[in-house]
Amino acid sequence: THDSGFAAALPDRLRGCVVYVCESASSEGPRAARGVMRFWEEVLEASPILIDAAAHDRQLAWTSHLPQAVAYALAKALADRGFGGVSYGTGARDTTRLAGSSPEMWLDIMLQNRDPLMEALSSVESGVATLRHLIETGDRQGLAQYLEIAREFRRGIDR
């Protein structure tokens, strides 16, 4: 989230949310992981899932770190363009919301999970290049298909 600290705390923020628990390499790892999972489930009413640390890093690179990086990139592009006193619409506000997050926190996350994040960023770059080509060439049918695939994926996220 873009908010942090005590003022942003909500008692039920994680209720029903999936949370990932990674087992440590220590001899206490399995027992400690079970305890952490019980805490998430019983106290915070979340849905804990035990996951390997490398799988966690790969998945979060795509589902958390990539959206964050893209939000920062879009906000930076808008800032560089310098629209000044222009009123930004809901699209700009919604898609850059994550860029309001703490840079200090995201510096560490992005650099520590560099390789999976770089793979995810390459995929977005490829997708943007395809989108640009479809618009540039006036490929209405290809563009419509691209947009529809993206829309259907987005609709499925909330199901």
Image (cartoon, rainbow, N blue to C red):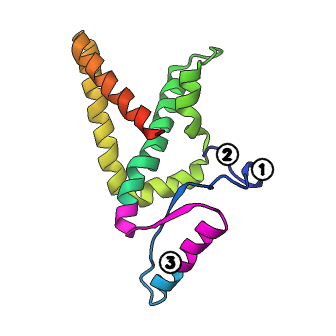
Picture coordinates of residue 45, whole percent (x, y): 62, 62
Query: Could you tell whether 100 is left or right of 134 in the image?
Result: right
Report the mark closest to the observer, 3 or 1.
3
Picture coordinates of residue 2, whole percent (x, y): 62, 43
The tag on residue 7 is 1
Please tell me whether mark 3 sits on a helix, a strand or a loop: helix
Does the magenta portion include 21?
A: no
Cβ atoms under marks 3 and 2 closer than 8 Å: no
Q: State the residue at coordinates (31%, 28%).
A: 149
Residue at which label 3 appears? 33
Q: State the residue at coordinates (41%, 82%).
A: 25
Please tell me whether mark 1 sits on a helix, a strand or a loop: helix
Query: Could you tell whether 143 is left or right of 25 in the image?
Result: left
The tag on residue 66 is none
Residue type at mark 3 is Ala
Report the mark closest to the observer, 3 or 2.
3
Q: State the residue at coordinates (53%, 23%).
A: 91
Q: Residues within 10 Å of mark 3 (few under 14, many from 20)?
A: some
Picture coordinates of residue 38, whole percent (x, y): 58, 74
Foreground pick, 66 / 42 = 42
Picture coordinates of residue 59, whole percent (x, y): 38, 55
Cβ atoms under marks 3 and 1 closer than 8 Å: no
Please tell me whether mark 2 sits on a helix, a strand or a loop: loop
Residue at which label 2 appears? 3
Q: Sequence order check: which comes first, mark 3 or mark 2?
A: 2
Above-or-below relation of 101 to 31: above
- Residue 97's quadrant in the figure? top right
Label 3 and label 1: CA atoms lie apart by 29 Å
Does the magenta portion include 43?
A: yes
Range of magenta residues: 33-56
